[in-house]
Image (cartoon, rainbow, N blue to C red):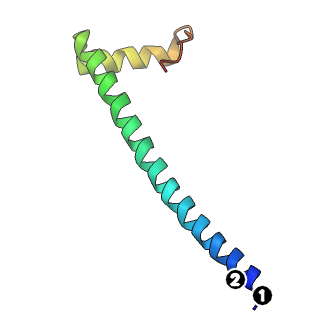
Amino acid sequence: MNPKIKKLKAEKEKNLRRIADMTARNTEIDAQVTELENLDIIGMVRDNEITPEMLVEILRRAKTMPLPVMEVADEE
């Protein structure tokens, strides 16, 4: 077999492993972001002393009377 073909196939295999590793890491990152967002939401609810029943009512009303969309600057 042509040595170039063997080298290119090896490079491709290496790239596929790296892609799989990065995809797995991105999945972990997404889970961590979701967890932190959930903790932020829980914190806001508790800070405002909102009961679970109140939150259900707020969300129910938001479906029928949507709040105006507010643009939030990225916190980077």
**Which quarter of the figure has residue 18?**
bottom right
Taking the spot 48% from the left edge, 48% from the top edge, the residue there is 26
Q: Is residue 47 above or below residue 23?
A: above
Which of the 4 image quarters holds residue 41?
A: top left
Task: Write the residue at 68% across / 78% down.
Answer: 7
Estimate the x, y position of residue 54 in percent, counting from the top left: 29, 14
Side of 21 relative to 14 (left or right): left
Residue at the image position 75 percent from the left and 81 percent from the top = 5
Q: Is residue 38 above or below residue 24?
A: above
Q: Around disc 2, counting alpha carbons within 10 Å, would you say few (fewer than 14), some (14 to 19), or many (20 or more)?
A: few
- Reading the image, the residue beneath label 1 is 2
Q: How far apart in space, not on screen, are marks 1 and 2 (Cα)?
A: 7 Å
Q: Are marks 1 and 2 in contact (CB under 8 Å)?
A: yes
Under circle 2, the secondary element is helix
Residue 16 in percent (x, y) is at 59, 66
Where residue 6 is drawn, which disc sits there?
Answer: 2
- 32 or 3, nearer to the observer: 3
The residue located at (61%, 65%) in the rendering is: 15
Q: Is residue 15 above or below residue 32?
A: below
The N terminus appears in which quarter of the rendering? bottom right
Q: Inspect the image, locate mark 2, and give the three-letter code of the amino acid beneath it.
A: Lys
